[in-house]
Image (cartoon, rainbow, N blue to C red):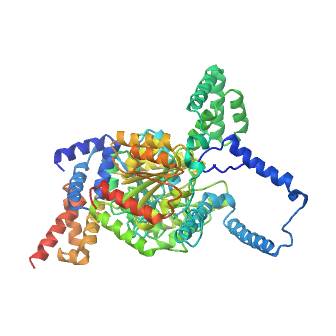
Amino acid sequence: MQLPAWNEALGLPRPWDQQWSLRAQQILAFETDLLEHDDIFRGSHVIEARVGQLVTEAQAEIDDIVSRGGAVAAVESGLVKQRLVESNARRLRAIEAGEQIVVGLNAYRETEPSPLTRDLSDTILVIDAAVEEERAAAVSEWRRAREPKAAATALALLEAAARSGENIMPSSIAAAKAGVTTGEWASALRKVFGEYRAPTGVAGARVTGTTNNTEEVTRLRKELGRLEKLIGRRPKILVGKPGLDGHSNGAEQIAIKARDVGFEVVYEGIRVTPEQLVTSAIEEGVHLIGLSILSGSHLEIVPEIVTKLREAGVRIPVVVGGIIPEADARSLREKGVARVYTPKDFELNAIMSDLVKLVEEAHGVS
Amino acid sequence: MASADLGALVERIGRGEKTAVAAALNLVEDTRAEARENAGALLGLLRGSARSQASHRIGITGPPGVGKSTLAAALARVLREDKKTVGVLAVDPSSTRSGGALLGDRARMAFDPADEGLFVRSVATGGEVGGLAHSAAAIVRIFAAAYDVVLIETTGVGQNETDVADVADTVVLVVQPGSGDALQFIKAGVMEIPDLCVVNKADESVLAQRAAADLSSALHAMRGAGVDHEVKVCLTSALAGTGVRELATLLTQRRATLPDSSLRTHRALVDVSWALSLFTRAHGSHGTEALGGTEALREEAAARAAEGVSALQIAAEWSTRYLDAARHR
């Protein structure tokens, strides 16, 4: 049973929010006769036709993937991810063009003040910072208290098993029993296999369908050409997602859109550390950094990145996108972030225009 | 830029300082006139350093999707384990319509940001046919002055990889099993170029063995046609980490056996074609004809390069000569 809650987009639901979802399901289950019937849609020509269509289309996709060598091959080649990215690109273009309605976003935007966003300290679950310290101390204590030789031996055996290509389950279980931690287990395997980084699906993605506002795109491309002549190099941006957040849709779409208006985009992907982003910014010589965070940890991670950039002498604009309440956005801007974008900013052309201006300003040209 | 500043930059590059290397790369990509002058001077100063001469510039090419980025990352990891420093140049195609590019190779490589001995730079081809960015030769020069090994990873679609053969000492062609790549390459004439071939995504299957066998026999057949050294075929799985150490060993051995004189000649040739391509990109065939034709220019470039003048400077001198002559006509 799933308990998605109304404030899930902003942060962790509180017990009250989860209870609300639970009660809603219980009302359906016990106050209606829904569960006394098997399929209430059987015989509905509308539903049966739609389901039939879904089955046909799904089967065609499955057949295509099988013909390419199966699901694993399709994932590894990046095909699956690329299709997802392209599909989302089409959806966003349709929203931007007004062809697809999202109530509250591109239609019916007037709103009464929402209790959800009025005071965020109260409407989502806030984790006490002390919990992190507690857990870190607990891990240290665990390591201190275990039998050191047994743990070290188990790790060595795990590494050897991984190198030889054996099944690592037995040595992993043995390692767990010897008190090896998850981090140590992962590090040992990383030493042998390196760290897998999945295909991002962005490089090969083709955006088809609606090309809304081609005039604006053309204008932006000209702007970028002009900017390139002024600053000597094609404007280059870094887009990445710091922290453990895997919600990459926004970052991917920004990356593709930026490429389509003429930026060179270094797409760093997900699960990047602040240090990796700063190093990438230096090595790649980018003119602007875009950080995407939907995990709620923006107030911790973004200032850390801004500080590390300054310490490294990298003076370029930083923009942030994600699920960021206005109060937090203000705080980030005070700490040196140039712009904050949320899902309300669905007009990608406007964001691109902003980015061009920011690079122009940073170089003292306009 | 004052020569003292350039001198300081050169020193810092020689020490492998990332901010210095990055500043140099940004400089050579800068197309403005003053930057071009400084870039030419910088490249002139970087020539001939001991590390530069000892460096190994390795091109990794092959069709899209064979796993070049993952292989380059795995190779870099093995080289780092052997305490060699590595500069990686990842080349992605630019969009011809928008002029933009998605430089996504970096995201396929796992790297430790604290490792001062590994530097990854992504560049776009900028619409150049041949799969290599116009600034690539300059970037390779800078990396060679800072790091022991330079890896140049290009997309390439199988027909026009010749550019990478110009800037690299060793060219590695990567294919994957089952796609008929090997046979395509034989037909397209790309087979003359690689010094080493890799079948990536190779498992125990018949398909992988067959791809390797196809490549081997095609290479053997070409031996009479001017390929004077044996081109080995390696089997790797970059994801599983197999075969990569063997590849690294083969590469190290090859570098050790490359005679200094032939390496110098090859690298000098780079300056000649680079200067010529810089000049013709700006002034076309009218320019080359006005200055006496390509052959004459090649000879002149070879002589100037032997004196230690960088390709950028040579091309700049030609530009000035051409524009002055045009003015006085």
Q: Nearer the viewer, residue B137 or A132?
A: A132
Q: Is residue A56 left or right of residue B292?
A: right
x and y percent of residue B297 in the render?
Answer: 21, 69
Q: Is residue B292 left or right of residue B29?
A: left
Q: In which quadrant of the rendered view does residue B310 lie?
A: bottom left
Q: In which quadrant of the rendered view does residue B290 lie?
A: bottom left
Number of marks drawn: 0
- What's the residue at 46%, 42% (across, down)? A274
- What's the residue at 68%, 65% (across, down)? A65
Query: In the rendered image of this protein, does residue B55 appear above or below residue A43?
Result: above
Residue A250 in sight from this viewpoint: yes
x and y percent of residue A326 in the render?
Answer: 49, 49
Q: Nearer the viewer, residue A317 or B19?
A: A317
Query: In the rendered image of this protein, does residue B318 appear above or below residue A135?
Result: below
Q: Residue furthest right?
A: A36
- What's the residue at 36%, 52% (across, down)? A285
Query: In the rendered image of this protein, does residue A13 appear above or below residue A97?
Result: above
Q: Residue furthest left?
A: B328
Q: Is residue B313 left or right of residue B179?
A: left
x and y percent of residue A325 in the render?
Answer: 52, 48
Residue B127 in sight from this viewpoint: no
Q: What quarter of the picture does the C terminus of chain B occupy?
A: bottom left
x and y percent of residue A21 in the render?
Answer: 73, 49
- What's the residue at 25%, 53% (across, down)? B43
Q: Nearer the viewer, residue A83 or A30?
A: A30
